Image (cartoon, rainbow, N blue to C red):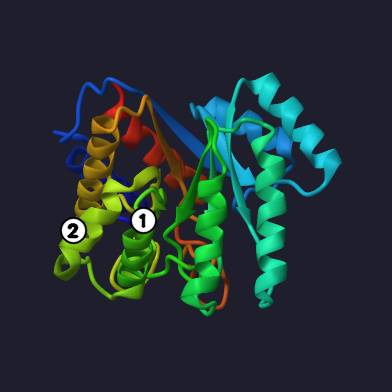
C-alpha cells in the first residue's frame, strides 16, 4: 500500500468513527459553522467566495482596523450571504495600552451586530486584577451580541485553574472554548481536571473546533487513526458544551473550524512542506460538525 492509498484508507476509517452515533442529535437550534482566514493566501473577496462554495455559513476574522478593508469585508459578506463573528484584542506588553486597544476594537465591532465577539483577552503575564478589567468591560456591554473570552495560550484564560478563578469571580462571564490549548498547557487530555473543565463547558457560548493533544495544540491530521483518542475527547467536550447551550435556551450554536497553517500544522524537515492540506482538513471538520449537530 503506497502513502496515498494509506492516507485515504485511514481517513475513511476515521470519518466512520467520528461521524457515527453523535451524542447530540436533532438540535432545536440553528447550527452555524464558520471558516477562518488564518493561513488563507488571498484577498477578502476570494476567501468569502471559497468559504461559501465549501458550505460554510459564515466567517470569523479579526476586526479590521482599516476602513477600506471594512468596506471590502462588508461587500464580500453581502455578496456571498455569509455571517460574521469578530476577533478583538490588544497587543504589546503595556497593560493600559493593551486594554484601550481592546476596548476600541470591541466598541467598533459591536456596531456591525456580529454573531459574537471573540476576545483574545489580556495576557498570561498581566496580574489577575489587570486581566479582570477586560472581563468587567465585556460585562458592562449590554445588547444582543455576546462578548466572549477565548481559552487561549498566552492570553488570560490560558489554563484551567486560572480560568476557573475568573469564572468564580464573574459567574456571568462567557467563553469561547478552544480546549486544544489546554490539552497542550496541561500535557494531558484533562481527565484529572474534569470538574473544572465541566464548569468551563457550562460557560461556553462558541467553539473553536480544533483538536489538540498532550504535546501540542493541533494534531497532525484528525482523520488519522493514531489521534482517535484525542478526537474522541474533543467531541465529548463539544457535545457537552452544546448540551449546556441548548439548556440555557440558546437558539444559535456556532463553531469555527480552526486547524491552522504551518507551523501549527506540522511540516517536513528542511522543506517546510505541510504534511496535509490545511483547507481540506478544515472542510473535513466542517462536514463532521454538520453531520454531528445539524437537525
Residue 198: % across, % down: 21, 54
Q: Residue at x 30, y 66 (%)?
A: 213
- Along the line of sight, which residue is nearer the eye, 62 or 225? 62
**Which of the two discs, 1 and 2, labels the residue nearer the N terminus?**
1
On the rendered image, what quadrant is the C terminus found in? top left
Number of numbered callouts drawn: 2
Instruction: Nearest to the eye among marks 1 and 2: give it.
Output: 2
Residue 273: % across, % down: 55, 65
Picture quadrant where residue 108 is located: top right
Q: Residue at x 81, y 33 (%)?
A: 71
Q: Residue at x 38, y 64 (%)?
A: 166
Q: Secondary structure at mark 1?
A: loop
Question: Residue 280: which numbered mark, if any?
Answer: none
Does residue 149 appear in the picture of this structure?
yes
- Along the line of sight, which residue is nearer the eye, 38 or 178? 178
Q: Which residue in the protein does label 1 denote?
A: 221
On the rendered image, what quadrant is the N terminus found in? bottom left
Relative to 38, 230 lies left or right: left
Question: Residue 229: which numbered mark, if any?
Answer: 2
Residue 62: % across, % down: 65, 49
Amino acid at each position: 500500500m503506497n502513502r496515498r492509498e494509506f492516507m485515504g484508507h485511514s481517513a475513511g476509517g476515521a470519518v466512520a468513527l467520528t461521524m457515527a452515533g453523535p451524542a447530540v442529535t436533532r438540535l432545536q437550534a440553528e447550527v452555524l459553522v464558520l471558516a477562518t482566514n488564518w493561513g488563507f493566501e488571498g484577498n477578502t473577496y476570494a476567501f468569502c467566495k471559497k468559504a461559501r462554495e465549501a458550505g460554510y455559513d459564515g466567517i470569523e476574522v479579526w476586526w479590521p482596523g482599516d476602513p477600506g478593508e471594512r468596506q471590502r469585508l462588508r461587500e464580500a459578506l453581502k455578496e456571498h450571504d455569509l455571517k460574521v463573528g469578530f476577533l478583538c484584542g490588544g497587543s504589546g506588553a503595556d497593560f493600559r495600552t493593551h486594554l484601550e486597544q481592546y476596548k476600541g476594537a470591541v466598541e467598533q465591532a459591536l456596531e456591525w451586530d456580529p454573531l459574537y465577539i471573540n476576545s483574545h483577552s489580556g495576557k498570561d503575564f498581566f496580574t489577575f486584577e489587570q486581566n479582570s478589567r477586560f472581563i468587567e468591560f465585556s460585562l458592562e456591554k449590554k445588547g444582543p451580541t455576546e462578548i466572549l473570552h477565548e481559552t487561549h495560550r498566552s492570553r488570560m484564560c490560558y489554563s484551567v485553574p486560572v480560568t476557573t478563578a475568573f469564572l468564580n469571580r464573574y459567574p456571568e462571564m462567557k467563553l469561547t472554548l478552544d480546549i486544544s490549548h489546554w490539552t497542550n498547557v496541561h500535557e494531558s487530555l484533562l481527565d484529572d481536571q474534569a470538574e473544572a473543565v465541566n464548569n468551563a463547558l457550562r460557560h461556553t457560548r462558541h467553539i473553536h473546533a480544533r483538536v489538540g493533544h498532550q504535546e501540542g495544540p493541533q494534531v497532525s491530521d484528525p482523520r488519522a487513526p493514531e489521534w482517535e483518542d484525542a478526537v474522541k475527547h474533543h467531541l465529548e467536550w463539544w457535545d457537552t458544551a452544546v448540551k449546556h447551550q441548548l439548556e440555557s435556551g440558546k437558539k444559535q450554536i456556532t463553531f469555527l473550524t480552526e486547524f491552522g497553517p504551518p507551523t501549527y500544522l506540522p511540516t517536513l524537515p528542511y522543506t517546510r512542506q505541510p504534511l496535509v492540506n490545511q483547507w481540506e482538513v478544515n472542510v473535513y471538520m466542517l462536514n463532521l460538525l454538520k453531520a454531528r449537530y445539524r437537525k
